[in-house]
Image: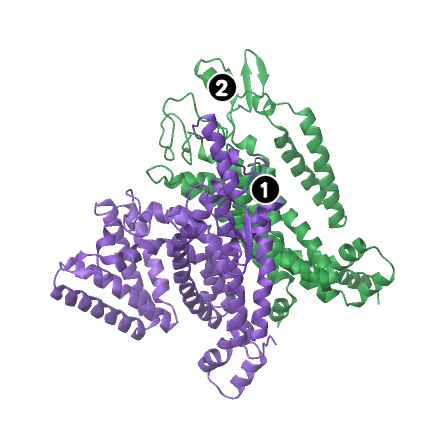
């Protein structure tokens, strides 16, 4: 295993070199390219100071040298093993521990390392929340669809998921912002950013006005959650559906009331109808864990709403709540595509294994269907999900470019767009290098996980 | 055995693989819906100048009949029309598909040359002149296109044009509203369908050619060629495609042809993987060994003998690939790196939240068009996967 790991890590080096080379060649071959003149362009300067600035840039980035030399210069700068660089730009002695330097951004005039250290955690936060969410929901839906093969849930979820997969994330983002964050419609969520400015001086957890408020809020949430859990686990399917229709219509009506103010209209009916159908299908699910999750989230939401009606209010919203509030829309917009893809994959993988010989053998032995599914089939069906996890990270990174631009979140994706638009060479190269590195590590992790889950796979 | 039975037997056996797949495909509702939407889109794209144009289709001035719309047709319009007519004509011709494809490509190329030399639309286009003539009562008879606004007609003759909701203006009808420059959204969407379709087909075509050649060489030769090729594939897969697209577009101007080439160059790695996997399986088989033993040239072995046998996964990937190429163009336009003045769905979608207010018609209609097109290709790809997969067919019958 160690041997294999070492080999894989070594193989990463040429790939990373190739990645940076491709991007560098694109930039160097571009008409107009990057030179000290283009950097100085647009500034109102005296000829002498312009010349001085050009010389300074040439010395700093080596822009007057031929492209291959520039590339090797950049490589030498980023690799921890290489020639030390003197203050005047000439090469010094060879060193094994000189540390890597990603250079200075043309546009920001700051160290790229600092910029990335600021931006990368935000993008990683978005992605690391999305991935478990995607997997949990996708496995839930996929298992349900596979169990119900050819049934109504299977067929409708199949079409629905394919549709969901086809929704461009920028459309989802724009619609979310337009309908749920703008002044014109429901102003439930913030339009962008990751926190309000006031939150910086607030506590981490929300601060209640008094202790009794905490108790009231907790009691509301607990009671409503328990009621929903009881209802959704005890009632028969048809009763649950009727309950869903009623609740959906009620929620739709409240939502329309919130927006338009007046008591009744066409849009009220349309929203009531829409929500009634949605809640009916959610409550009618045959999968108990999924229903309990729905009950839990409904209880939490409605409990807090009821508590707010009873006069419970926060003294301070606190950092945590504020962060969650800002993250809801971006996370949904980032994760639904991967969710749809993975749910479909889970379904097909489960179906393949449910029809396999070993599953039939287990059934013939008298193992009940639940145990066949969870103990025998499910573990084997995880393999393709693990393989796909490697490609999930790059697609999420690309998705966060769009999402961060729409929701104006200052993450690495937005940095990449800005860097490319301003032809900020050092930044473009570093962002590509980092995302390439993350992707390759994703592949490696997936391969290792594969070996751990499937004992038949051995890399030695 | 009677002659009739023999005939029937032969007919049953000699049905080519392409026809079998097509028949299996058309049995599925999802594939039909996808194909119908793509068909509608092709028709809209081909006849877009006749559907939405500020120039009248027919007008009578001082007893003189003229058609400004026909006079303003650009070379591109003529090529689209010619390509459409060739497609309809060739569809019924019973020849092998690749022969028809080659002939079609040749005819389109010839018509492109002819159109570019012959068509000379006026370079100075005044969109509002006909409306002004009509207001002055100079037009005796006039017939407009269904949507009487061109994609780049910014309604300069109306004083305060800008973002308008659908049917908001009283003196004009804009079914889908107007964008921030005052142009009709429906008209821009109709003209943008060409970009979506063109990018989808040509970018995927480029990716397919590169991917097939590299993947084919990798699979056929294996060994050292394979190792180097796989590193190349890995490089292109490890760079997030969007980053690469962004840097390509930002550093090389923004023309539609450049965009097609760029999307094609960044999308080939998946096809190379599929072709390589198929060719690795095929290279040891007898018919390939026989072809090699006959001393056939490499080109013939790879593309006439091996490729048709490894086509199935490529076909499915192509359908999904067209969807992602369309999505890539829309994303670039959305991020403000698309075409500058030409209409594009992504660019319209971008305007929905650009101003301080949210303009829902700029999100719903263009976004809906992107969604429908991507969905259609995904439906087609899904149905194709079932149709070419012998495994599902067998389990379906059983």
Quarter of the image holding residue A357? bottom right
* Disc 2 packing (10 Å; few <14; some 14–19; many ≥20): some
Query: Where residue A307 sits in the image (x, y, percent)?
Result: 17, 61
**Is residue B33 visible in this depiction of the protein?**
no
Residue toward you, A362 or A116: A116
Query: Where residue B241 sits in the image (x, y, percent)?
Result: 54, 51
Query: Where residue A269 sits in the image (x, y, percent)?
Result: 29, 50
Labelled disc at residue A28? 1
Cα distance between the residues tagged 1 and 2: 49 Å
Residue toward you, B229 or B120: B229
Q: Nearer the viewer, mark 1 or mark 2?
A: 1
Residue A69 lies left or right of residue A188; in this view the side is right
Q: Residue at x 49, y 29 (%)?
A: B152
Secondary structure of the residue carrying tag 1 is helix
Secondary structure of the residue carrying tag 2 is helix
Q: How is the image coloured?
A: by chain
Q: Residue at x 60, y 60 (%)?
A: B385
Which residue extends farthest bottom? A365
Query: Where residue B4 sits in the image (x, y, percent)?
Result: 81, 61
Residue underneath mark 2? B130
Residue toward you, B394 or B326: B326
* Disc 1 packing (10 Å; few <14; some 14–19; many ≥20): many
Residue A290 lies left or right of residue B281; in this view the side is left
Quarter holding the C terminus of chain A is bottom right
Q: Residue at x 35, y 47 (%)?
A: A177
Quarter of the image holding residue B62? top right
Q: Chain of mark 1?
A: A
- Kindly indicate which chain is depicted in purple in the rendered structure: A
Query: Do the residues marked 1 and 2 share a common chain?
Result: no
Q: Is residue A96 above or below residue B124?
A: below
Quarter holding the N terminus of chain A is bottom right
Residue A77 lies left or right of residue A242; in this view the side is right
């Amino acid at each position: 295993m160690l041997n294999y790991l070492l080999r894989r890590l070594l193989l990463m080096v040429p790939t990373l070199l190739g990645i940076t080379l491709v991007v560098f060649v694109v930039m160097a071959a571009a008409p107009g390219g990057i030179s000290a003149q283009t950097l100085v362009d647009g500034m109102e300067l005296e000829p002498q100071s312009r010349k001085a600035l050009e010389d300074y840039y040439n010395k700093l980035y080596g822009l007057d040298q031929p492209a291959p030399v520039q590339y090797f210069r950049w490589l030498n700068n980023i690799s921890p093993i290489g020639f030390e660089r003197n203050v005047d730009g000439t090469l010094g002695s060879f060193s094994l521990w000189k540390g890597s330097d990603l250079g200075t951004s043309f546009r920001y005039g700051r160290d790229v390392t600092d910029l990335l250290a600021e931006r990368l955690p935000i993008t990683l936060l978005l992605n690391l929340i999305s991935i478990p969410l995607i997997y949990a929901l996708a496995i839930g839906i996929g298992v349900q669809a596979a169990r119900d093969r050819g049934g109504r849930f299977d067929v409708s979820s199949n079409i629905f998921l394919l549709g969901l997969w086809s929704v461009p994330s920028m459309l989802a983002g724009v619609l979310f912002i337009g309908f749920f964050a703008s002044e014109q419609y429901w102003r439930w969520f913030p339009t962008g950013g990751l926190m309000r400015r006031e939150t910086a001086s607030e506590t981490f957890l929300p601060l209640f006005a008094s202790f009794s408020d905490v108790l009231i809020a907790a009691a509301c949430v607990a009671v409503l959650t328990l009621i929903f859990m009881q209802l959704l686990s005890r009632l028969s399917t048809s009763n649950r559906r009727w309950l869903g229709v009623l609740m959906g219509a009620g929620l739709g009506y409240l939502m329309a009331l919130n927006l338009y103010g007046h008591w009744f209209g066409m849009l009220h009916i349309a929203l009531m109808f829409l929500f009634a159908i949605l809640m009916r299908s959610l409550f009618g699910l045959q999968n108990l864990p999924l229903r309990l999750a729905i009950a839990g989230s409904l209880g939490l939401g409605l409990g807090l709403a009821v508590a707010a009606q009873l006069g419970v209010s926060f003294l301070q919203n606190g950092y945590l709540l504020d962060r969650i509030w800002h993250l809801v829309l971006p996370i949904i917009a980032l994760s639904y595509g991967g969710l749809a893809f993975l749910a479909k994959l889970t379904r097909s993988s489960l179906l393949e294994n449910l029809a396999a010989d070993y599953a039939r053998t287990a059934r013939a032995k008298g193992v009940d269907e639940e145990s066949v599914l969870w103990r025998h089939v499910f573990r084997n069906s995880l393999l393709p999900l693990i393989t796909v996890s490697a490609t999930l990270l790059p697609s999420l990174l690309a998705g966060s470019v769009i999402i961060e631009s729409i929701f104006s979140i200052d993450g690495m994706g937005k940095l990449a767009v800005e860097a490319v638009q301003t032809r900020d060479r050092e930044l473009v190269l570093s962002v590509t290098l980092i995302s390439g590195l993350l992707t390759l590590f994703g592949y490696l992790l997936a391969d290792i996980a594969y070996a751990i889950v499937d004992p038949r796979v051995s890399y030695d | 055995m009677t002659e009739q039975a023999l005939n029937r037997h032969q007919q049953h056996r000699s049905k080519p693989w392409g026809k079998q797949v097509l028949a299996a495909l058309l049995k599925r509702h999802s594939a039909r819906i996808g194909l119908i939407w793509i068909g509608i889109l092709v028709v809209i794209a081909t006849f877009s100048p006749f559907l939405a144009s500020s120039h009248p289709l027919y007008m009578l001035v001082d007893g003189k009949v003229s058609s400004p719309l026909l006079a303003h047709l650009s070379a591109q319009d003529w090529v689209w029309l010619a390509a459409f007519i060739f497609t309809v004509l060739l569809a019924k011709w019973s020849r092998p598909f690749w022969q028809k494809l080659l002939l079609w490509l040749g005819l389109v190329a010839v018509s492109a040359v002819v159109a570019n030399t012959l068509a000379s639309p006026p370079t100075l286009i005044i969109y509002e002149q006909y409306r002004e003539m009509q207001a002055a009562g100079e037009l005796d008879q006039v017939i407009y296109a269904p949507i009487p606004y061109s994609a780049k007609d910014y309604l300069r003759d109306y004083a305060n044009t800008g973002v308008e909701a659908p049917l908001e203006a009283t003196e004009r009808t804009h079914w889908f509203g107007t964008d921030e420059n005052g142009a009709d959204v429906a008209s821009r969407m109709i003209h943008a369908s060409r970009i979506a379709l063109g990018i989808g087909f040509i970018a995927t075509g480029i990716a397919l050619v590169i991917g097939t050649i590299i993947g084919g060489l990798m699979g056929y030769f294996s060994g050292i060629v394979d190792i180097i090729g796989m590193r190349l594939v890995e490089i292109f897969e490890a760079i997030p495609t969007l980053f690469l697209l962004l840097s390509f577009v930002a550093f090389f101007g923004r023309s539609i042809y450049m965009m097609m080439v760029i999307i094609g160059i960044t999308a080939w790695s998946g096809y190379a993987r599929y072709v390589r996997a198929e060719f690795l399986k095929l290279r040891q088989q007898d018919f390939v060994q026989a072809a090699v033993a006959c001393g056939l040239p490499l080109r013939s072995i790879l593309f006439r003998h091996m490729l048709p046998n490894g086509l199935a996964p490529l076909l499915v990937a192509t359908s999904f690939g067209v969807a992602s190429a369309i999505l890539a163009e829309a994303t670039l336009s959305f991020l403000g790196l698309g075409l500058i003045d030409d209409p594009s769905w992504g660019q319209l979608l971008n305007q929905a939240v650009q101003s301080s207010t949210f303009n829902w018609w700029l999100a719903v209609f263009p976004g809906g068009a992107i969604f429908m097109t991507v969905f259609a290709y995904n439906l087609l790809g899904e149905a194709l996967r079932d149709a070419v997969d012998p495994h599902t067919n067998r389990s379906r019958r059983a």
